[in-house]
Amino acid sequence: MPELPEVETTLRGIEPHLLHKRITQVIVRHPRLRWPIPNNLNALLTGQTIQAIHRRAKYILFTFKHGTLILHLGMSGRVRILQENTPPEKHDHVDIQTANCTLRFTDPRRFGAVLWTDEDPAAHPLLAHLGPEPLTHDFSGQYLWERSRHKTVTVKSFIMDSKVVVGVGNIYAAEALFLAGVHPKRAAGKVNEAEYVALVKAIKKILQNAIKQGGTTLKDFLKSDGKPGYFRVKLKVYGRDGEPCVNCGEALSHLRIGQRATVFCKNCQQ
DNA sequence: AAATTCTCCTGAAGGC
DNA sequence: TGCCTTCAGGAGAATT
């Protein structure tokens, strides 16, 4: 369940090993992920040089002269850098090799994706309709307030909608709503501008903190047990159903919103 | 058009 | 101990 900070940490971890490197071979062991991995991926990439690596939402984009490799970790996906020959295990679906190292993609639940586009990646169907990045100035309280007018969807689902803003997953949505004191089930259209300002502030703070914490684990990134992001962050509500609220001591409540577990404090979140 | 539900998949956890 | 059931979840697709 990588959230945006985990993806950002992953990007920063692999970039130094892969930037400007030439692909020597691509091995696809299990092409069936969320969508099939292109069957000509090895031919497409072998001999080509990675010119840049970017993140958009939770997608990692590898820029080549002739196109872009799009990687998504889904919820159980992970990549790591191998510097010596390591036998693949059960869920090691893809290896992307350079002269010096291998990028290995592992994904037990196979919700991830490895795709290719030879056009502008921003125009790709998966990326074309994404909302602003949460850590940019475009993402503001006023923006959320304006976009939410007359919406009846819950505010939690609203901030998790990638067309509204990208990178706010289930864990950090719950945390941000708690920090901002907003009840997750409120109708998005009934949340006022001041509350959205607080919510945006909370989202940015939480994401930035998680990225910062993730950065502290970068030195471990080569190891298979590197644990970036939320493993290092103290969560206040997510996964704490029934435990005391850190503010008021009230037992935290639990409900489901859009098929997703939601924990909140009925005292502190109105 | 907007909101809700379904779907992919496997490992972990719980029940008996 | 072990088998069976249930659940978790990112996000696009399908449905209401």
Image (tube, coloured by chain):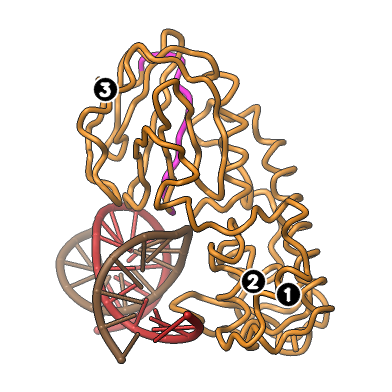
Chain colours: A orange, B red, C brown
> Mark 1: few, some, or many residues within 10 Å (few <14, many ≥20)?
many
Q: Judge whether residue A20 is colored magenta.
A: no
Q: Please say if A28 is above or below A127.
A: above
Report how far apart the C-alphas of labels 1 and 3 lie in the structure.
46 Å
Front in this rendered view, residue A221 or A20: A20
A19 on left or right of B10: right
Circle 2 marks a residue in which chain?
A: A
- The spot of residue A78 in percent (x, y) is 45, 40
Could you tell me if the residues under marks 1 and 2 are in contact, i.e. CB atoms within 8 Å? yes
Residue A84, percent across and down? 42, 13
Assign a secondary structure to mark 1.
Answer: helix
Residue A79 is inside the magenta segment: yes
Dividing the image into 4 quarters, which one contains the C terminus of chain A?
Answer: bottom right
Residue highlighted by disc 1: A178
- Residue type of the residue flagged with mark 2: Ala
Residue on which the image places disc 3: A42
Q: Nearer the viewer, mark 3 or mark 2?
A: 3
Which quadrant of the structure image shows residue A196?
Answer: bottom right
Which residues make up the magenta segment?
A75-85
Residue A105: quadrant of the picture: top left
What x and y, as percent, mark residue A73? 44, 46
Q: Chain of mark 3?
A: A
| Residue closest to the eye, A102 or A18 | A18
Residue at 60% across, 20% down: A16
- Judged from the image, the secondary structure of the residue bearing numbered disc 2 is helix
Q: Name which residue type carries label 3.
A: Asn
Task: Choose the circle earlier in sequence order: 3 or 2.
Answer: 3
Query: Which residue bears the numbered disc 2?
Result: A174
Q: CA distance from mark 3 to mark 2?
A: 41 Å
Numbered disc 3: secondary structure: helix
Which residue is drawn at the image coordinates 50% and 44% (left, top)? Answer: A122
Task: Pinpoint the chain carrying mark 1.
Answer: A
